[in-house]
């Protein structure tokens, strides 16, 4: 039996959350991200800003040149995460097979839902709008590949209609590709819309006169394998709308990390150490939230000329404590950084993850007291916010 896969994409998610917090932003050209004079990048932008040429991942300095009246809003990623979780909770109510692929995207397997897929999608869209005040676009097909592309095609078509009306609104699109029509739906689309076709592959395809997904589908699979290796086999299948990948309900966390790019190159020892300690605290919190601990502590550091170094140390026992992570990261930094050497970016990561080991021996009482104190701090900060209480060295 064919599957029914739904792909949901929250429209301009960060901006939509900011509009809920500050209604006066609605209809205005604004972007979420860093300051233009501090190497800021556009994380998300409103549809009014997009009409002026502003795009995500664009340097904020360029965005301001394209749209001189652009309002810049600092990102609030913890808030975005909390709102995203509310959306995912709604999705989990609809299906036991939900795969979250980013903070604002997810797949659902709704094969067992007896309702008409398009009606189901519109009711889900309306619920997210009514309960959370968030717009979203949805694509439905027999597999993940076509469902995601359906969302992209539906959004583009809706935005074109909205633009023609002189408006700047979210697309709120719903696009359904019936079973058996996958290849016909994909055929006229540009080749670069297909998963696995990056800039280099797209250029090589163009050299062979292949410009659309339909063009790829016409080529023999063996020839595509000869040209592109194993990726050619995937290209041949995907171009025909074939994708057997299942919904992955959980992904194993392989590492947890934090990094910071400074607004200006940093030489202050105090600021660098403070940054590493704050990053270590956040990494440790995330590990504890996921009931994980790690053995390998990694430092990432980038100099002003963009030279990037990584150094790591493997501990004898896994840890989820910020003091251990910070102590190791600081030691690694002192090994590679010369006195007063400027730093553009710095980061901390923990890998080699597994379940925390709690073996309390004769000399482990101090460690256990620290762990209990940390658990109490976690509970308070989770309930009242991270600023409610801090360690003495953090203030």
Image (spheres, rainbow, N blue to C red):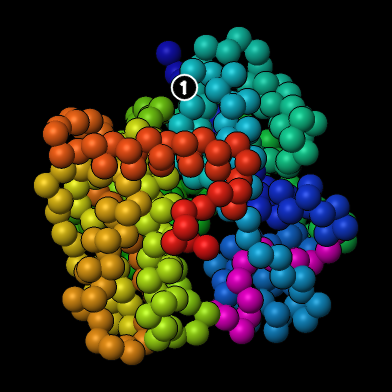
In the rendered image of this protein, does residue 218 appear above or below residue 190? Answer: above
Q: Quadrant of residue 237?
A: top left
- Residue 63 to residue 360: above or below: below
Front in this rendered view, residue 382 or 4: 382
Q: Residue at x 42, y 45 (%)?
A: 285
The number of numbered discs placed on residues in the rendered structure image is: 1
Q: Is residue 33 magenta?
A: yes
Percent coordinates x, y for residue 82 in the rendering: 61, 40
Question: Taking 312 as reference, is 11 above or below it?
Answer: above
The percent position of residue 140, horizontal first and vertical second, equals 57, 31
**Residue 204 seen in render:** no
Which one is nearer the viewer's eye here, 103 or 267? 267
Residue shown at 66%/17% (left/top)? 116
Q: In the picture provided, is 136 more to the left or to the right than 351?
A: right
Residue at (48% x, 41% y) in the render = 377
Segment tinted magenta in the rendering: 27-39
69, 280: nearer the viewer:
280
**Dot 1: element:** loop
Query: Does residue 132 lie above or below 264 as drawn?
Result: above
Q: Is residue 112 magenta?
A: no
Which residue is label 1 attached to? 97
Q: Quadrant of residue 135?
A: top right
Residue 343 lies, in percent from the top left, at: 37, 82
Instruction: Characterize the local packing of mark 1: few (<14), some (14-19) or many (20 or more) Cα atoms within 10 angstroms.
Output: some
Q: Position of residue 45 (x, y in %)?
A: 68, 62
At x 22% / y 69%, what residue is drawn? 332
Question: Who is closer to the viewer here, 280 or 123?
Answer: 280
Q: Is residue 101 left or right of residue 129?
A: left
């Amino acid at each position: 039996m064919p599957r029914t896969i739904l792909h949901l994409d929250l429209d301009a998610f960060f901006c939509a959350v900011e509009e809920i917090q500050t209604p006066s932003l609605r209809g205005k050209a604004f972007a979420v991200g860093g300051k233009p004079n501090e190497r800021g990048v556009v994380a998300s932008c409103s549809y009014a800003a997009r009409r002026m040429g502003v795009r995500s991942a664009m340097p904020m300095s360029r965005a301001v040149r394209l749209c001189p009246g652009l309002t810049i809003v600092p990102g609030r990623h913890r808030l975005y995460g909390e709102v995203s979780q509310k959306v995912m909770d709604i999705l989990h109510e609809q299906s036991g097979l939900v795969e979250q692929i980013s903070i604002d995207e997810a797949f659902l397997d709704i094969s067992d839902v007896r309702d008409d897929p398009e009606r189901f999608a519109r009711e889900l869209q309306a619920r997210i709008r009514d309960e959370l005040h968030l717009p979203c676009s949805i694509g439905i097909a027999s597999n993940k590949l076509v469902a995601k592309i359906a969302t992209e095609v539906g959004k583009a078509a809706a935005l074109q209609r909205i633009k023609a009306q002189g408006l700047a609104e979210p697309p709120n699109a719903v696009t359904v590709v019936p079973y058996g029509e996958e290849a016909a739906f994909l055929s006229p689309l540009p080749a670069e819309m297909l998963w696995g076709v990056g800039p280099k592959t797209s250029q090589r395809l163009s050299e062979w006169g292949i410009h659309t997904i339909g063009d790829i589908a016409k080529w023999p699979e063996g020839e595509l394998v000869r040209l592109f290796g194993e990726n050619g086999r995937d290209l041949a299948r995907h171009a025909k709308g074939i994708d057997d990948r299942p919904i992955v309900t959980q992904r194993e966390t392989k590492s947890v990390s934090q990094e910071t790019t400074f607004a200006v190159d940093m030489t202050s020892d105090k600021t660098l150490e403070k940054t590493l300690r704050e990053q270590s605290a956040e990494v440790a919190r995330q590990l504890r939230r996921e009931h994980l601990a790690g053995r390998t502590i990694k430092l990432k550091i980038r100099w002003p000329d963009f030279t990037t170094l990584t150094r790591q140390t493997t501990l004898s026992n896994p840890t989820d404590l910020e003091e251990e992570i910070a102590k190791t990261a600081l030691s690694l930094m002192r090994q590679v950084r010369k006195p007063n050497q400027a730093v553009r970016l710095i980061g901390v990561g923990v890998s080699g993850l597994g379940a925390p080991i709690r073996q309390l021996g004769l000399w482990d009482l101090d460690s256990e007291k620290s762990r209990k104190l940390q658990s109490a701090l976690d509970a308070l900060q989770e309930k009242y916010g991270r600023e409610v209480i801090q360690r003495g060295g953090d203030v």
